[in-house]
Image (cartoon, grey):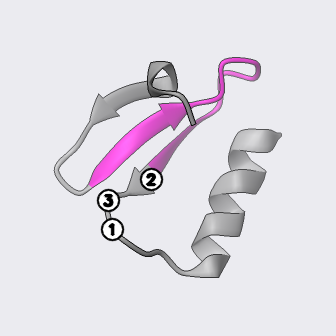
Amino acid sequence: MKRTNLIRNGEKHDWYRNPKTGVSQPIPRHREIKEFLALHVVRKLKS
């Protein structure tokens, strides 16, 4: 994801937006996230 899609930095999450759809989603700041969460984020931002 490009840095331009970053909306804001939070303490534990960063917010990203899909510029085509305008959908925003928080992304946790962890080295690794569970696959279920990763798929959820991708599906949410893709639609």
Question: How many tags in the picture?
Answer: 3
Q: Is residue 20 above or below residue 30?
A: above
Cα distance in 3D space between marks 3 and 2 = 7 Å
Label 2 or label 1, whichever lies nearer to me, is 1
Q: Decide: marks 3, 1 in contact (CB < 8 A)?
A: yes
Quadrant of the rendering where the N terminus is positioned: top right
The three-letter amino acid code for the residue at tag 3 is Arg
Label disc, if present, on residue 30 of the rendered structure: 1
Count residues near mark 3 (Cα–Cα under 10 Å), then give few for <14, some for 14-19, many for 20+.
few
The quadrant in which residue 37 appears is: bottom right
Asked if residue 40 lies left or right of residue 17, the reply is: right
Q: Please give the residue where the numbered disc 2 appears in the rendered image.
A: 27
Count residues near mark 2 (Cα–Cα under 10 Å), then give few for <14, some for 14-19, many for 20+.
some
Label disc, if present, on residue 3 of the rendered structure: none
Cα distance in 3D space between marks 2 and 1 = 9 Å
Count residues near mark 1 (Cα–Cα under 10 Å), then give few for <14, some for 14-19, many for 20+.
few
Q: Please give the residue where the numbered disc 3 appears in the rendered image.
A: 29
Q: Which residues are magenta?
A: 13-26
**Is-magenta flag for residue 36?**
no
Asked if residue 2 lies left or right of residue 39, the reply is: left
Label 3 residue SS: loop
Q: Residue at x 51, y 24 (%)?
A: 5
The quadrant in which residue 15 appears is: top left
Q: Residue at x 70, y 42 (%)?
A: 45
**Is-magenta flag for residue 18?**
yes
Q: Could you say which is closer to the camera, residue 4 or residue 22?
A: 4
- The single residue placed furthest to the right in the displayed view is 47
Asked if residue 6 lies left or right of residue 40, the reply is: left
The quadrant in which residue 46 appears is: top right
The three-letter amino acid code for the residue at tag 2 is Ile
Asked if residue 42 lies left or right of residue 13, the reply is: right
